[in-house]
Image (cartoon, rainbow, N blue to C red):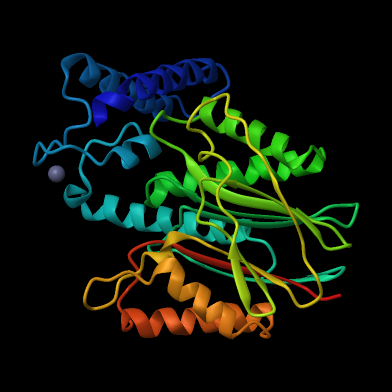
Amino acid sequence: MVTAIEPLLREQLINRRHRLEDAVIDFQRPAELMRLLAEVDAALDRMDLGTYGICEVCHDSVESERLIADPLTRFCIDHLTPGQQRALEEDLELASQIQTGLLPQHYQKIDGWEVAYHYEPAGPVSGDYCDLISGEDQTLHFVLGDVSGKGVAASMLMAHLHAMFRTLTSINLPLEQMVERASRVFCESTLPTQYATLACGRANTSGEVEICNAGHLPPLLIQDGKVTSIAATGLPVGVFCSESFTVNRIHMSQGDTLFLYTDGLSESLDGTGSEYGAERLAQLLGKNNLLSPDSIVSLCRQELLAFTDGRPPRDDLTLMAIRRTK
Ligand SMILES: [Zn+2]
């Protein structure tokens, strides 16, 4: 695993070295600078010797997501010193706060639409991306995504997606082009093994909704107790740099609800090891079609908790309900 990411990490280390050298001139603390330079050089030496990414205590591999987050890491997570352990916990706490700060307002009522969501990381940080962006032209953009992998590396990619979509929605491209650009940028700036599934859409005041589903679990449309799923129209973003996407167009009337979720819901297991599944979800939504977005989201959480018998979640969970109110 480490060998796959090593060329990229080497490049990062060399870049870091150049930046440190550039900083020599106006750096206030030369001793600190020299220490950092020595650490970078030592990491490059380990790459040349073939010992890079191997824990110095147990000689097992260092977790690759930790190497991506910090290419200077020398110990696996089990062999950090108490001081390093504490620093890691503080970093995670800070990362979690930053991630929470990236989330949209919890409950939103925008011209003709009412939206509620629930975002719950399985660990300190999540690899799910959830966003609501209202445009100047009264449109509402919604995005729900799931980045490959888990933990810190996935949360960094989540932040990357967040920044990209925030920029792309401001230039008002057709939805499919927006996703195509996001996919290209994501592909060019991440490792080959990293991608994200996402369902995103744009709703306008007259009830027209465009949805682009890039390899994500089908969003469910609830109309008069009938539930239809909106299948994926493309591969996940970032799989290939030149992917193209298509868009589904639907009309939503007053009282219709669109429900989006990540696999933290559908792939949750009960005591016997069976999955919660999309079918069970569709039945629950169909029977409760009159509920407000907020109540639908709460109901799903209660059902999931009952299903898993309160066991801690194995995966990040995000739920979003969008209802047309006029
Ligand atoms: Zn170790």
Quadrant of the rendering where the N terminus is positioned: top left
Residue 100 higher or lower than 136, as above or below: below
* Residue at x-position 58% and y-position 60%: 219
- Is 21 positioned to the left or the right of 41 in the image? right
Name the quadrant containing residue 206: bottom right
| Residue 243, x across and y down, in percent | 57, 29
**Residue 7 drawn at (x, y percent):** 34, 19
Ligand 1: quadrant of the figure: top left
Please tell me which residue lies in front, 317 or 199.
199
Q: Quadrant of residue 10?
A: top left
Q: Residue at x 9, y 36 (%)?
A: 59
The answer to whether residue 265 shows anywhere in this view is no
Percent of width and height locating residue 32: 41, 30
> In the figure, is residue 259 to the left or right of 110?
left
Question: Residue 269 at x, y = what percent?
Answer: 30, 71
Q: Quarter-wise, where is residue 4 in the image? A: top left
